[in-house]
Amino acid sequence: MSEAASIVGPLPRHVGIIMDGNGRWARSHGLPREEGHAKGADSVRTVVRAARKLGIQALTLFAFSSQNWDRPPEEVFHLMQLLRRYLIQERSEILDNGIRLITVGDTERLPAYVRTPLVELMTASANNDHMVLCLALSYGGREMIAKAAAAMCRAAVAGKLDPADVDPDVFGSYLESSNLLPPMDLLIRTSGEHRISNFFLWEIAYAELYFTEKLWPEFERADLEDALHDFAKRERRFGLTSDQVSTLPSRTLAPDEDGTSAASTGG
Ligand code: FPP
């Protein structure tokens, strides 16, 4: 049952979260970094549950970046173990709540002990339609753009794509995220840092950005609601004037697929 009524105003269709601050949380509690990640996994559980209850269509969590492979091997190992545990422990809740699990990123690099439960849960949840939970794993925004560019070049060389036809929509359609997720309307970053850190670079062109001082392990449902309240108050103009936007059905809508209008349904 959706509890979106608790938010006054439109909900973002797709929320992305850069979950930052696990290490600082651990240090501030005199604990090893691993404990910060473990507490961070509890926040993942809380926020997925809250997003589902609030009626968010899609939630993407930046769980492991392409660059995180360069962290100390024991930290990488611990994060992989946490991921595996999450996939096993949350399986029934994800399925019972009609959540579809998908991923973006180079998941081929993940160890088999993560990939196996991941693929199994993605397959088991493939027909669920209450919310999409997207885990960005071994993910880099630049890497995804380069991959899309390479695929487009291959299509051109094969005579399947005329370079003269390439525009933002055509390019966007080559991105892994293109058919999987609605436009990212809101991007949240925790821990007081004001960076995108190679997250959804292309897809956040018109996302509203929300930064909070809260460290990820402290992030709760109320913090997500604060971000949603803030989003609901914003005027999104997509390059138009305020007067133009005020005549549109909703102030908070992302442009249509063709990028020419802001009059799509806002969820
Ligand atoms: C950033 O904090 C966080 C990460 C690199 C990993 C995020 C992982 C989790 C929240 C837990 C596992 C995920 C799932 C989906 C179960 P940081 O380590 O960079 O923190 P710091 O900047 O304070 O050092």
Image (tube, rainbow, N blue to C red):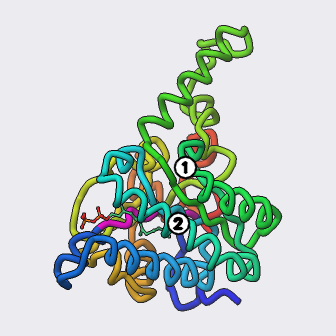
Where in the image, quadrant-wise, is ligand 1 located? bottom left
Mark 1 sits on what residue?
A: 110
Instruction: Give, as a single range, the part of the protein colored magenta.
Output: 14-20
Residue 215: % across, % down: 28, 76
* Residue 1 seen anywhere in this rendered image of the structure: yes
User: Quick check: 75 left or right of 111?
Assistant: left
Q: Is residue 173 above or below residue 77?
A: above
Q: Is residue 15 above or below residue 54?
A: above
* Residue 205 seen anywhere in this rendered image of the structure: no
Principal SS element in the magenta part? strand
Q: Is residue 197 above or below residue 48?
A: above
Q: Nearer the viewer, residue 24 or 7?
A: 24
Mark 2 CB lies closer than 8 A to ligand 1: yes
Q: Nearer the viewer, residue 237 or 12?
A: 12
The total number of labels drawn is: 2
Q: Nearer the viewer, residue 108 or 240?
A: 108
Mark 1 CB lies closer than 8 A to ligand 1: no
Residue 247: % across, % down: 53, 61
Residue 10: % across, % down: 54, 74
User: Quick check: 227 left or right of 185?
Assistant: left
Mark 2 sits on what residue?
A: 83
> Callout 1, which amino acid?
Leu
Q: What's the residue at 69%, 46% (across, down)?
A: 179
